[in-house]
């Protein structure tokens, strides 16, 4: 992860820009690199500022998101994208992930969740708001063979899909963060996932959460 994370914002509503800028400026490892209110200016901004991450609201797009992402990649091949959603049902999260975005959060999420999402995504993970995860998992109707997890792995999986951070999971289970990270790695391997977002989706698709609660 870079020592200073450069973040740009693309959102049609100008009043929203100041709030995001204020949140990011409160963190020493982040810098607000500029904002745009339409698709063309968003692409130009990213080309000029070369941010590590773009916070993208769908209200700036005039074309399908796949077209925008393709254009963005030609200008900034290494950029990460987090989509900002106004409502939990605004768009299908699995579809967005398949199209190449790296995270989805709600505009109603807390500043702390936004900051963590930025750090996680720039660090190489995917990030999905816990509210979005719950809605996506609740609507999942896919069935696959159930396989056993240990009781401890079940607890960790439930806490993960509830949006808990590594530190919060460690506190809940009275373990160190280092231990939790190791156990998460074991859980990902068992599920065939590479990160917490994939683990949550797989759990939902295999209807594991309902069995554990």
Image (tube, helix red, strand yellow):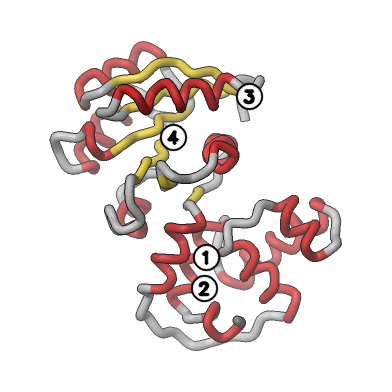
Q: Residue at x 40, y 30 (%)?
A: 54
Q: Nearer the viewer, mark 3 or mark 1?
A: 3
Cα–Cα gap, marks 1 and 4: 21 Å
* Residue 27: mark in rendering: 3
Q: Nearer the viewer, residue 98 or 137?
A: 137
Q: Disc 1 designates what residue?
A: 200
Classify mark 1: helix, strand or loop. helix
Cα–Cα gap, marks 1 and 2: 5 Å
Cα–Cα gap, marks 3 and 1: 28 Å
* Residue 203: mark in rendering: 2
Label 2 crowding class (10 Å Cα cut-off): few <14, some 14-19, many 20+?
Answer: many
Marks 1 & 4, CB-CB < 8 Å contact = no
Q: Nearer the viewer, mark 1 or mark 4?
A: 1
Marks 4 & 3, CB-CB < 8 Å contact = no
Earlier in the chain: of badge 4 and badge 3, it is 3
Q: Nearer the viewer, residue 187 or 54?
A: 54
Earlier in the chain: of badge 3 and badge 1, it is 3
Q: Residue at x 35, y 80 (%)?
A: 141
Report x, y in % for residue 98: 34, 54
Earlier in the chain: of badge 3 and badge 2, it is 3
Classify mark 3: helix, strand or loop. loop
Cα–Cα gap, marks 3 and 2: 33 Å
Q: Disc 4 designates what residue?
A: 80
Q: Nearer the viewer, mark 3 or mark 2?
A: 3
Q: Residue at x 75, y 63 (%)?
A: 183
Classify mark 4: helix, strand or loop. strand
| Residue 38 located left or right of residue 169 | left
Marks 1 & 2, CB-CB < 8 Å contact = yes
């Amino acid at each position: 992860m870079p020592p200073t994370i450069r973040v740009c914002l693309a959102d049609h509503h100008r009043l929203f820009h100041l709030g995001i800028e204020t949140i990011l400026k409160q963190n020493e490892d982040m810098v607000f690199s500029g904002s745009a209110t339409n698709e063309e200016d968003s692409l130009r901004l990213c080309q000029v500022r070369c941010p590590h991450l773009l916070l993208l609201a769908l209200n700036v797009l005039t074309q399908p998101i796949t077209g925008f992402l393709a254009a963005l990649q030609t200008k900034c091949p290494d950029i990460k994208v987090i989509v900002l959603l106004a409502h939990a049902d605004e768009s299908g999260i699995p579809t967005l992930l398949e199209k190449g975005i790296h995270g989805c959060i709600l505009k109603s999420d807390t500043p702390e969740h936004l900051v963590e999402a930025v750090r996680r995504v720039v660090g190489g993970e995917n990030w999905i708001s816990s509210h979005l995860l719950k809605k996506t998992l609740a609507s999942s109707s896919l069935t696959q063979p159930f396989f056993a997890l240990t009781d401890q792995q079940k607890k960790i999986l439930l806490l993960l899909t509830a949006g808990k951070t590594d530190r919060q999971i460690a506190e809940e289970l009275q373990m160190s963060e280092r231990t939790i990270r190791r156990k998460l790695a074991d859980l990902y391997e068992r599920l065939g996932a590479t990160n917490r977002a994939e683990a949550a989706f797989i759990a939902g698709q295999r209807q594991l959460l309902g069995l554990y609660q």
